[in-house]
Image (tube, rainbow, N blue to C red):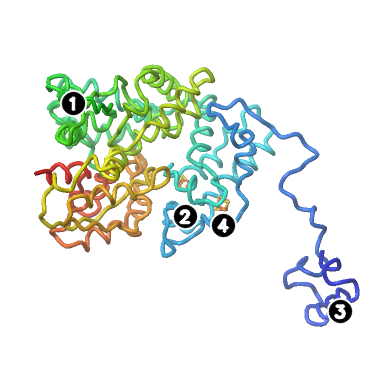
Amino acid sequence: MIPFMFGEEIYEYFKQIKQIFDPNGIFNPGKIVDAPRMNTFLRIDHTKPKREFQTYFNFDNDGGFSNSIEKCNGSGDCRKPQILGGTMCPSYKATLDEKHTTRARANALREIISKSNKGNPFVDEDLMEVFSLCLSCKACKSECPSNVDVTKLKAEFLQHYYDDAGVPFNVWMIGNLNIFNRIGSFAPKFYNFIVKNKVTSSVLKYLLKFEQKRQLPELKEISLKKWDRKHQAARTNRQIYLFADEFTNYFDSDIGVKAILLLEKLGYGVKIAPVGESGRTFFSKGLLKRAKKIAEMNVRNLADLINENTPLLGLEPSAILTFRDEYKEIVSGDLHDSAKNIARHTFLLDEFLANEFEKGQINSNSFTEQSLNIMLHTHCHQKALAGSDALMKVLSIPENYQVEEIKSGCCGMAGSFGFEKDKYDVSMKIGELALFPAVRNAPEDTIIVANGTSCRHQIAEGTSRKALHFVEVLYDAMK
Ligand code: SF4
Ligand code: SF4
């Protein structure tokens, strides 16, 4: 290339100068002078056919699974340190180790599946090691210039790994959290005794491979769905469906109740969507066979209900955004159009309220005139798929509320990630990058808002301060 750009004569001078100053060719060998041909070290060997796999997710938009890995162009944006902001990539920001970048994960997958001769190349402990600290935060899906989606790649890899290596007991238990919570909800006091008692909780944490320092979340006395069955729903023609996700339903039903009462006061009729869990725990742990069944069941149940007049709204970002993100990429072909239609009409509650406020359906006069300072931490999945503008807007509906967004990336908890014994230190380190110091330095009378149940848990354990869901703040602000 250099002789072509500068001409043979000048290139000869380059060679002579190089020979004078670096006769043994020890400085940047092979660069500028005596460089190999441009097609010498291509990472794709076009003489070999690409290896494709039967995948659980649909990768058609990327031209197949292999191409979705090839999207990484090596730019290294995923090596940004915390000081440059953004969320990608929290595991790199905490460890400053290339092995824990988005790029390393894409590269490792490519290397293994293109070079391995095994029938199932995914059963590979090195690959497991490279993916181990990925928090499935989805930041790369939006911040990587090529939109490499490692959350999706990791889940796909894990399911193939488990297909041959089996599902570890602790992973199975975490995936099935909703079933344990449902059983526990028949005797919440007993459940809470088990998770709080020193002996029983330590046995539970041992089985789950959780860090002993972590506090397990407790169930509320009554689940959101149970409360709603006794609640006299308001009659109105402005109807919405609220998703009582697996976390809000059992751990944060008080927030769900406030959401229903808030919506009713604002003139909306609320029905609980006739679905169970979102499947988030299965997606996060790579148990995609089960996640696919849940996604298909939910899409079938909602196909005729959700449309532009009756949208689906949710409170917990990681759960509701599954309807918008993963479902349309995992349901089988006959449900694809329905999944896409549901995705189009699925919103975080803050997105819905911000939109209604814009349209003039909600007025600041319904809220207090008192002043309040709020610091907001936005959930990673919300940052990646929806952004924080709507959340900032709804929190500013009471006219004297001042909202400041914390320039935090991921909180470090990411579902069960931060609970796991071998991830605990990294989890807390990620929290310390920006979120914990900002919360600790916030004045006592400043309210901390975080919509993710994991984020609130992490803030409580990392800073001893209680964070609220935005619904709690807005509910309290109603006149
Ligand atoms: S993963 Fe994305 S940000 Fe990282 S090197 Fe590849 S293209 Fe660049
Ligand atoms: S999902 Fe998050 S932790 Fe995993 S590679 Fe992407 S940015 Fe990094």
Q: Residue at x 44, y 34 (%)?
A: 325
**Mark 4 or 2: the one toward you:** 4
Disc 2 is placed on an element classified as helix
Is label 1 within 8 A of ligand 2 (CB to nearest ligand atom)? no
User: Residue 292 placed where, x, y %?
Assistant: 45, 23
Report which residue position mark 3 lands on. 13
Disc 1 is placed on an element classified as loop
Report which residue position mark 4 lands on. 76
The amino acid at mark 3 is Tyr
Looking at the figure, which quarter contains the N terminus?
A: bottom right
Looking at the figure, which quarter contains the C terminus?
A: top left
Mark 1 vs 4: CB contact within 8 A: no
Mark 3 vs 2: CB contact within 8 A: no
The amino acid at mark 4 is Gly
Tell me if residue 255 comes above or below residue 292 in the rendering. below
User: In the picture, residue 430 is in which quadrant?
Assistant: bottom left
Whether residue 184 sits left or right of residue 125 in the image: it is left
Is label 4 within 8 A of ligand 1 (CB to nearest ligand atom)? yes
Sequence-wise first label, 3 or 4 = 3
- The disc placed on residue 223 is 1
What is the CA distance from the residue labelled 2 to the residue labelled 1?
38 Å
The amino acid at mark 2 is Tyr
Q: Say how many tags the image has.
A: 4
Q: Residue at x 63, y 51 (%)?
A: 73
Report which residue position mark 2 lands on. 92
Outermost residue on the front side: it is: 360
User: In the picture, residue 6 is in which quadrant?
Assistant: bottom right
